[in-house]
Image: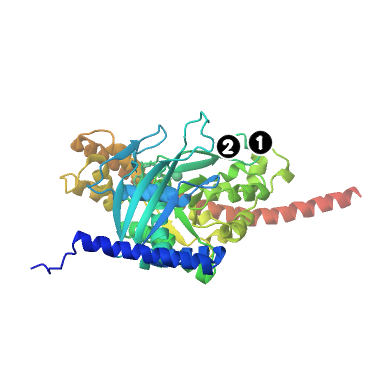
Amino acid sequence: MFPTRDIPSPSSLFSAYASMAASMMLVRSMANEIIPQPVRGFLLSTLRYYFKPHSDRLTLIIEENCGMSRNQVYDAAEVYLCTKISPNTERLKISKSPKEKNLMIRLEKGEKLIDLYDGVELKWRFVCAESEKSNPNDSQPRSEKRFFELTFLKKHKEQILNTYVPFFLERAKAIKDEERDLKMYTLNSSYAYHGVKWESINLEHPATFETLAMDPELKNSVIEDLDRFVKRKEFYKRVGRAWKRGYLLYGPPGTGKSSLIAAMANHLRFDVYDLQLANILRDSDLRKLLLATANRSILVIEDIDCSVELQDRRRVDGRKQSDVQLTLSGLLNFIDGLWSSCGDERIIVFTTNHKERLDPALLRPGRMDMHIHMSYCTSHGFKQLANTYLGIRGHHSLFSEIEGYLENTHVTPAQVAEELMKSDNADVALQGLIKLLKRKNIEGDDAAADAAADQKNAGIQKAKRQKLENKPRKSTRNTRAKSVIRRRKCL
Ligand SMILES: Nc1ncnc2c1ncn2[C@@H]1O[C@H](COP(=O)(O)OP(=O)(O)OP(=O)(O)O)[C@@H](O)[C@H]1O
Ligand SMILES: [Mg+2]
């Protein structure tokens, strides 16, 4: 049952209203006489403010521009809200420019949506309003003012401003990173004449951690290491270290070092700077180049064992010796010192085919955080490649033969991948691989026999040399003695 109330008659309502209006007029005329005008105005506006019904909601207006520049909160909201589109949304805008990979989806004007954050309900509305013309005779069309309205209960104001807004700014950044093309920067070819410059192209390397054939434990530890690194901004700040991480990738050619770098870049959505040291002459140029690199990037120095043989370069390129002033210690000191503290989220990767040839300065503990060995193809690596290239997920009758060969044959993942690409027919491709493995196996045996023979020969040669070294010394002494005698005789 609904509670019943006495409903006043229209005539009683009218007389109550008339008497209230009369008393208001009386108060006003008395006030007009007693209270001076400025004070009266102030009192009236204060009374109006306090007796106006107040909403328990707060609305934030997020305009497209702030002064001359774009409002980052607006741009972030636009991107973030695309992920919140509900089945109730009726109108959306879609677009795609030639340079973009994906469709861009945005709210249409007047559309509303609801977001939930930590149990708080947030109402969003996208508004496009035509701005007023300052001069009504102006023939220019009215400009459109776009903004978002974000409405929520006032009691959540602190939470929304301090955590929700930073949260969607961060989310939008991640979404944009995901959408944008990765870049690969290389040194421009006319470097010597036009000074230090990076040139970029889109990095469209398809390598990912899923397609990379490598020891699964090692692969997981690299992924975990990268993920931990990007999450540790506060940690690096707290312990007073530059937010950088160094990886040394070593292994024979064709074992996937460059592919691993591409997989890292694709995983983190970081740009890559490929620093070809052979093109740089001076430490000062190197510094300029390094300072021109952006945050959230991977600096790659490939074949470090070859590129730092600076003395040899002097002879090769024929430049004056004074022109060539790039040193490994200059590079390492700068990377460890100034450069890494000038930016955030820096990753440095060195690669080499010969770890044993590297300068000990590079291998010193603390210099490269992780040493990653990229090995010849293992049975696990082969299965990964068979899955990627031939789509074989489970077992295949030729696998055991192949795995048997792989145990004692040195074949790189690049060579295996090349064989597997030769036919769409899995049997044909795998037979081709077996042939290669057999050949390699024989070559390997021959090579081992050759190596053993070489070793034996080397032993014999060494013994002979030692013998000869002993003889000449005597003979030299004899010759010298004879020549002295001869000279004396002459005298
Ligand atoms: N571990 C791997 N997993 C998957 N594919 C691989 C792997 N290693 C090599 N490949 C294939 O071989 C090609 C060459 O490999 P990559 O350039 O990564 O080798 P690398 O170790 O960098 O060789 P280099 O020492 O000569 O620079 C790659 O494009 C890829 O197709
Ligand atoms: Mg490489």
**Residues packed near mark 2 inside 10 Å, few (<14), some (14 to 19) or many (20 plus):** some
Picture coordinates of residue 237, whole percent (x, y)? 51, 67
From the image, tell me which residue sits under label 1.
Answer: 194
Badge 1 amino acid: His
Q: Which mark is residue 73?
A: none
From the viewer's perspective, is 395 left or right of 388? left
**Residues packed near mark 1 inside 10 Å, few (<14), some (14 to 19) or many (20 plus):** few
Residue extending furthest toward the top: 139
Foreground residue among 141 and 19 = 19
Can the viewer see residue 397 in this picture? yes
Foreground residue among 451 and 358 = 358
- Figure quadrant of residue 330: bottom right
- Determine the residue positioned at 54% across, 55% down: 358
Disc 2 and disc 1: Cα gap in Å? 9 Å
Q: Is mark 2 within 8 Å of ligand 2?
A: no
Mark 2 element type: loop
Can the viewer see residue 409 in this picture? no
Give ligand 1's quarter of the image.
Answer: top left
From the image, tell me which residue sits under label 2.
Answer: 188
